[in-house]
Amino acid sequence: MDIEALLKEKDLKVTPQRKAILTVLAASHTVMNVQELFQEVIKILPGINFSTVYRNLDTLLARGLLCRISRETGGDLYELRREKGHHHHVICKGCGASIPVKFCPLEAMAAELAGKGFLPTEHRFEVYGLCDRCQEKRR
């Protein structure tokens, strides 16, 4: 993955901090919380501080490079947006794998919401469970 090209495509300045964050997320096949992400980024950029990582996450999210997944126990999870367009996730509670799904429950509600004069501005839909591998491990 060409991280510099990805940043430039989104009209973002290419900085060592952004490159490190995206490098870590590109190498990960699971979602990461900000602390896990920071622990990996600091291996690439030892001088980076936590607030810099956090601030850059907001920028990368705003430009559509990342997905943020709210966890039922609190604290957001992050992953590199690998799918184009609108999608949701199913998240394994065993290994943390995040699997994008195209289904959006809001589409089924659109007509009803419009009829009530309600305009949704954002929504989240995540399903938590166990992937095939984690189910197998529990058997």
Image (cartoon, rainbow, N blue to C red):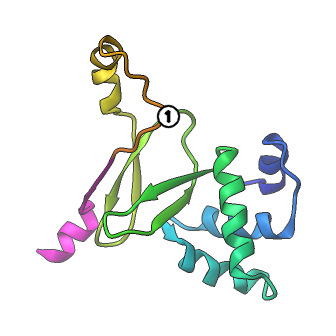
| Position of residue 15 measured from the top left corner of the image (x, y, whole percent) | 87, 64
Looking at the picture, tell me which residue is in the foreground, 62 or 21.
62
Residue at screen point 54% across, 79% down:
36
Q: Is residue 23 visible?
A: no
Q: Which residues are magenta?
A: 126-139
Which of the 4 image quadrants contains residue 91? bottom left
Looking at the picture, tell me which residue is in the foreground, 63 or 111.
111
Q: Is residue 56 above or below residue 106?
A: below
Residue at screen point 47% across, 37% down:
122
Dot 1 crowding, Cα within 10 Å, few <14, some 14–19, many 20+: few
Q: Residue furthest front?
A: 117
Looking at the picture, tell me which residue is in the foreground, 118 or 77.
118
Report if residue 90 lies within the magenta region.
Answer: no
In the image, is 94 to the left or to the right of 32? Answer: left
Residue at screen point 28% across, 22% down:
108
| Position of residue 62 measured from the top left corner of the image (x, y, whole percent) | 67, 47
In the image, is 65 to the left or to the right of 45? Answer: left
| Position of residue 54 measured from the top left corner of the image (x, y, whole percent) | 66, 69
Report if residue 127 lies within the magenta region.
Answer: yes
Amino acid carrying mark 1 in the image: His
Which of the 4 image quadrants contains residue 110? top left
Q: Residue furthest left?
A: 139
| Position of residue 118 measured from the top left corner of the image (x, y, whole percent) | 38, 22
Q: Is residue 76 visible?
A: yes
In the image, is 44 to the left or to the right of 97? Answer: right
The residue where tag 1 is placed is: 86
User: Mark 1 falls on what kind of element?
Assistant: loop
Which of the 4 image quadrants contains residue 75? bottom left
